[in-house]
Amino acid sequence: MPKFVVPRRSGAHRVAAIALYRALLTQCAAPSLPLADDQRAGLRNIVRNKFRRNRHVHSSRLLKLAFTTGYELLDTLDRASLSATEHADASAQEAATLLTSLLISAPPHLTGPPRRKPGLKRLDPSPEACPPPEQTVLALRPRPLSELGGTGIRQVPHLFSANLFPVLRIGKPQPRSLSRVLTDKVKQRQRRLNVREKSEDEWAELGKLEDEWDRIVSEVCGVKDLDTYDVQTGDTADGVANGRGGNGAFHGVSWASEPLRFVRMINTQLTTQKAETERTVKRMQEIVDQEAELAYKEREARNAVRRQKNLEERRENDVDEILGTKDTKKDRPI
């Protein structure tokens, strides 16, 4: 094999190595081999670990030693398999003894199973990723007392406005997903406002000038007016009259009408967003009210338990004071 060829990329080398590997594993599992099941498994692990360790070896000298050792082990396994038969001789017994001593002297990292490559790690969702709809704050709140973590004392969330967008603050620090959503909403609203302002102040005025120019060209040069053009179908009044299709819904189209259409579209989007914001505010306020009511009831329950406990301790101290079995000055609660 040429020196410039990497052995593990050579077809001949791979065929020889795989053939030896399969022969060794097959012979290690032979029923006639005088070894216990755990010894067979240890011997197979030695073969697997050795081949795995030498798979990147490029030295001809080391590869020759590895192949020689592998074939010698294969011959030893063949002789040891004959030790339990009628034709067993001294060499077969020596081979079986050699395998047993080999397993005893082998280090644990060879007799153990090969380490598997670590699989793909399960990546946690990005901190900026929004939770699924069924796990949002609006869907989970208010939570029952059994699901409260930490001290178990309910903290009432706080409703505030972040650039005119409602936010229900549960705790600090603020989640990165919430910060990203607020930033995107603010940028989206600002883009819409910028387009609406530019459409009203700049594009509409330019459209009026274009309409005036079309009127002048129509009067001076006799160019047909565009009032007979249907925007949706692309037909003209002449085409419909000649039987070329169309729906007859022809209306005047001007350069100034398109910016105004943008304005109406953006106003509709802003109105829809405002209505959605109002619904969200109502839902958040309901959560705050429910959380506050539950917090009040839980606080009253804790106070009742505390008062009952103090009353029992005071009763015990009074009994001890009457019986004289306890130092009242030291044990009476303050």
Image (cartoon, grey):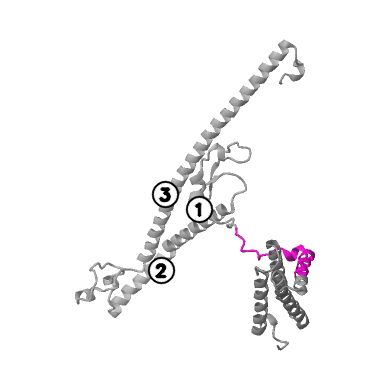
Quadrant of image for the C terminus: top right
3D distance between C-alphas at marks 3 and 2: 33 Å
User: What's under tag 2, amino acid-wise?
Assistant: Leu
Disc marking residue 275: 3
Residue 51: name its quadrant: bottom right
In front of the other: 317 or 16: 16
Q: Residue at x 77, y 79 (%)?
A: 65
Among numbered discs 1 and 3, the one appearing first in the sequence: 1
Among numbered discs 3 and 2, the one appearing first in the sequence: 2
Mark 2 lies on a secondary structure that is helix
Please check the rendered image and state whether residue 56 is part of the magenta-colored stretch, yes or no.
Answer: no
Please check the rendered image and state whether residue 122 is part of the magenta-colored stretch, yes or no.
Answer: yes
Mark 1 lies on a secondary structure that is loop
Instruction: Give the magenta part as a residue range.
Output: 96-123
Q: Residue 237: give x, y in percent of width and height.
A: 23, 73
Q: Residue at x 36, y 69 (%)?
A: 255
